[in-house]
C-alpha cells in the first residue's frame, strides 16, 4: 500500500523525535510491503526563518496533498518569546492548521503502562484495575472561538468571552465517540456542565439523541468538576470520554499526568472528511533540544495512531505498541522515565531496542 505522509517536524525536539519516528515507519514499510512517501514541510519558528510566517501556504499545500499529517511540535524558549520568530508561534501555527482543515475531533489516549505504573502520581490502589481510556475533545466550538471583549464601564475594567455550540458540532464528535466506544468496552461518559450552562444543556440533549443510534453503548453523563475529581480518585472507571473544547483541554491535561510523562502522550485530530493530523501532546521542550535525550514514544505512538485510524493498518499499529511495551519491560527508557540518568538511554538508543523488539514480535 502506498501512502503520502506530510511530515511537519517543527521546532525544539520535534525534528529529533521525528527522525526516530521515521525509522520506525520505515521498518513497518519494509516488513509489511508498504510504501510511505514523505513530504517534509516547515511550521513554527522553523517556518518563520524561511518564510517570515509561522504557518505558510506552502506547508498547507503539502498537507492538503497528503493522506495524513504527521506533526511534531512548535514553539521556542520562554526567554525568547519577545522575538518575532516566537511571538504567538504556537497559536499562529496550530490554530491556523486546525482551522484550515476544520479539525473538529481531537482524540487523546491515556494509558498507564504496567511496566511504568510506579511513575503514576496516584497511589497503587487507585490504578490497580488499570488505566486505559480515550478522551474525545471537540475542537471547533466553545469559548475559544466565541467573541472576546475587554472594556471599561463605570471606571471598572470588565471582560467577556462568548461560548457557542451548534447541533452539528456536537453530533459530529458524539458519533465519533460512540463509534470508538463500540470498538472498546461499550461505555461512553459525556462530560458537561448542564446544571448551569446553556451550551451544556444543548450538548447533553444532542448526545442523548445520538445515543439512540448506538443501543449497545452504555451512556453516562458527568459534570466536569466531578469528572476532574473522578480522574484522580478512580480513573479506571473510564473507557471513552467525550466533552467540549475547554473542558477537554483541561481534563486531557489532567489525565496526561497519569502515565508519568508527557513523552508517552500521543494524539490525533480529524475533520468530517476523516483527514487526520497526528501529534505528540507535549510541547517542543527547547531545553532538551540537541541533548539526544528526548522521549520519542509520543511521536511514535502518534504514528501508530495514524497507521490504525488513517490507513487501517491495524496489525502494524499493534506491533509498534506491543514493541514499546516490550522495550519498557526490558527496563529500557529515556531520562524522563528512568530512575536516574545512569539507567537512561538516548533517544536513538531507545529506538534501536524498539526496532529489535519489533523484529522479534513480527510473525
Image (cartoon, helix red, strand yellow):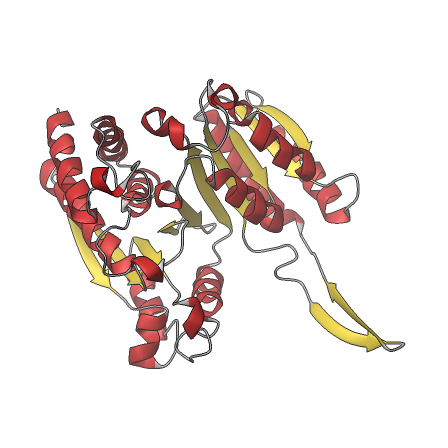
Residue 96: x and y in percent read: 46, 67
Q: Quadrant of residue 284?
A: bottom left
Above/below status of 298 relative to 151 = above
Question: 291 or 83, which is in the foreground?
Answer: 291
Please state if 158 lies on the left or on the right of 71 as rendered.
Answer: right
* Residue 34 visible in rendering: no
* Residue 107 visible in rendering: yes
Question: 69 or 265, which is in the foreground?
Answer: 265
Above/below status of 52 relative to 102 = below
Residue 7: x and y in percent read: 26, 58
Residue 293: x and y in percent read: 24, 50
Q: Residue at x 72, y 41 (%)?
A: 193
Above/below status of 190 relative to 294 = above
State which quarter of the image contains the C terminus. Answer: top left
Q: Residue at x 41, y 74 (%)?
A: 80
State which quarter of the image contains the N terminus. Answer: top left
Residue 147: x and y in percent read: 69, 67
Amino acid at each position: 500500500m502506498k501512502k503520502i505522509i506530510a511530515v511537519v517536524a517543527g521546532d525544539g525536539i520535534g525534528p529529533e523525535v521525528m527522525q526516530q519516528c521515521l525509522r520506525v515507519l520505515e521498518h513497518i514499510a519494509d516488513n509489511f510491503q508498504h510504501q510511505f512517501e514523505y513530504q517534509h514541510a516547515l511550521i513554527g519558528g522553523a517556518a518563520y526563518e524561511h518564510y517570515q510566517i509561522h504557518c505558510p501556504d506552502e506547508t498547507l499545500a503539502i498537507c492538503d496533498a497528503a493522506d495524513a499529517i504527521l506533526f511534531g511540535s512548535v514553539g521556542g524558549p520562554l526567554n525568547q518569546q519577545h522575538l518575532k520568530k516566537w511571538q504567538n508561534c504556537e497559536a499562529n501555527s496550530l490554530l491556523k492548521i486546525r482551522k484550515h482543515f476544520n479539525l473538529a475531533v481531537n482524540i487523546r489516549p491515556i494509558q498507564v503502562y504496567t511496566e511504568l505504573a510506579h511513575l503514576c502520581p496516584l497511589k497503587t490502589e487507585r490504578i490497580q484495575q488499570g488505566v486505559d481510556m480515550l478522551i474525545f475533545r471537540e475542537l471547533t466550538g466553545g469559548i475559544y472561538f466565541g467573541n472576546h471583549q475587554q472594556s471599561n464601564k463605570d471606571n471598572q475594567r470588565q471582560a467577556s468571552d462568548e461560548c457557542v455550540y451548534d447541533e452539528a458540532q456536537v453530533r459530529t464528535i458524539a458519533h465519533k465517540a460512540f463509534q470508538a466506544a463500540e470498538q472498546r468496552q461499550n461505555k461512553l461518559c459525556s462530560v458537561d456542565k448542564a446544571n448551569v450552562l446553556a451550551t451544556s444543556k444543548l450538548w447533553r440533549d444532542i448526545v442523548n439523541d445520538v445515543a439512540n443510534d448506538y443501543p449497545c453503548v452504555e451512556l453516562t453523563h458527568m459534570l466536569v468538576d466531578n469528572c476532574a475529581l473522578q480522574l484522580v480518585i478512580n480513573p479506571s472507571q473510564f473507557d471513552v470520554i467525550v466533552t467540549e473544547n475547554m473542558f477537554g483541554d483541561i481534563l486531557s491535561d489532567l489525565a496526561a499526568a497519569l502515565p508519568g510523562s508527557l513523552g508517552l502522550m500521543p494524539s490525533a485530530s480529524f475533520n468530517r472528511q476523516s483527514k487526520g493530523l497526528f501529534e505528540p501532546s507535549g510541547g517542543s521542550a527547547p531545553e532538551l533540544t540537541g541533548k539526544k535525550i528526548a522521549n520519542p514514544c509520543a511521536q511514535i505512538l502518534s504514528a501508530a495512531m495514524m497507521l490504525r485510524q488513517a490507513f487501517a493498518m491495524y496489525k502494524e499499529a499493534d506491533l509498534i505498541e506491543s514493541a514499546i511495551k516490550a522495550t519498557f519491560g526490558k527496563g529500557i527508557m529515556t531520562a524522563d522515565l528512568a530512575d536516574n540518568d545512569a539507567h537512561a538511554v538516548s533517544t536513538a538508543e531507545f529506538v534501536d531496542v524498539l526496532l529489535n523488539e519489533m523484529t522479534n514480535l513480527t510473525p
